[in-house]
Image: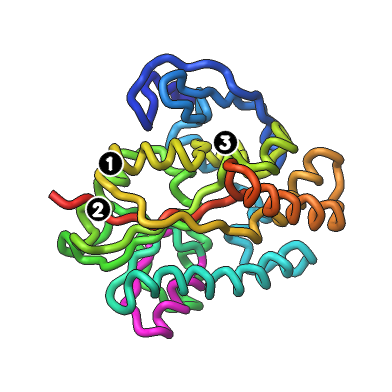
Amino acid sequence: MTEKLTQCPVCRGGNFSGYLEVKDHFLTGETFQIQYCQGCGFRFVNPRPGNTEIGRYYQSEDYISHGVEKRDLISRLYKQARTFSIRKKYSIVHKYATTGKILDIGCGTGEFLAYCRSKGFSITGVEPGEKARHFARTENRIPVSEQLSGLTVQPAYFDCITLWHVLEHIHDLDETIGRVKELLAADGTLVIALPNSNSWDKNRYREFWAAFDVPRHLYHFTAKTFGEFAARNGFELQKTIPQKLDAYYVSMLSEKYLHGKINYLKALIFGFWSNLQARRRDTGHSSLIFVLKMKKG
């Protein structure tokens, strides 16, 4: 069953216009409408699959986020980049929370949390995907809950909470961010990574931009609309950090969606150019990491 939003998740406005029709290039070939709010400019899939229907859009052996057994070139490159990315993520977390308790929402197979544990953190994960959750528990020995609501810890328990490219997948934004505020210590740090739908590579590929990834990505934030969302929910932005590697990966998949085959040379060229343009213009990089603290008082 599909559901139709009548209220903007960011500003609560109710006037929407069509932005772009995008095909699910990854799996089903179905087409979805991305709309934007006339009040704040926020972009989101509308109408969208409901909570009970969305699962079928993840049912693929090639869903690389949880592909723990793939041996093809793309997966190998992805996993090498992931190793580098894990260390980069940890360096960000460590700057704001040197030790303590960390929760990773959408932890996947648990490699990031395992690395944090090796550095002295007490770790907890949330992962709704059964296969990834099982791998995290059995192979990486991560304590993982299926849902955020299933955690049985005291309020203000975590020193750091992270969502690495997860928020754009979550149907119940308000419920999730409310639970995050409840679980985060008063001086704790929230780290959220998101695709940037104002980036140069998005403007190049438009409806073929891989990071639209409809309907799995329900929301398409920019730095501006995420800042408004964070502020409305009681968070202050401390720092915005680019994820430069994402431009290459997104360009690689976008080339495949646009031309029907992967072109590694073009992916390198356009990924580099996207990062270069992000420095020259105010559009921002392909993906952005937001470091936040709760507002005082």
Q: Quadrant of residue 217?
A: top right
User: Residue at point 35% right, 84% down?
Assistant: 120
Q: Are marks 3 and 2 in contact (CB under 8 Å)?
A: no
Marking on residue 158 = none
Q: Which residue matches tag 1?
A: 233
Amino acid at dot 3: Pro
> Where does residue 17 sit, x and y in percent of width and height?
52, 16
Gap in angstroms between the C-alphas marked 3 and 2: 30 Å
Q: Which residue matches tag 3?
A: 215
Residue 253 drawn above or below residue 124: above
Coloration of the structure image = rainbow
Q: Quadrant of residue 125?
A: bottom left
Amino acid at dot 1: Asn
Amino acid at dot 2: Met
User: Residue at point 48% right, 26% down?
Assistant: 41
Residue 228 drawn above or below residue 162: above
Magenta span covers which residues?
A: 109-128
Q: Which residue matches tag 2?
A: 294
Tell me the crowding category of disc 2: few under 14, some 14 to 19, or many 20 or more residues within 10 angstroms, Cα based. Answer: many
Which mark is in front, 3 or 1?
A: 1
Where disc 2 sits, the SS reads strand
- Front-most of 1 and 240? 240
> Where does residue 179 sit, x and y in percent of width and height?
25, 50
Which mark is in front, 3 or 2?
A: 2
User: Residue at point 36% right, 20% down?
Assistant: 13
- Residue 185: in sight, yes or no? yes
Tell me the crowding category of disc 1: few under 14, some 14 to 19, or many 20 or more residues within 10 angstroms, Cα based. Answer: some
Counting residues from the start of the chain, the first of labels 3 and 2 encountered is 3
Gap in angstroms between the C-alphas marked 3 and 1: 25 Å
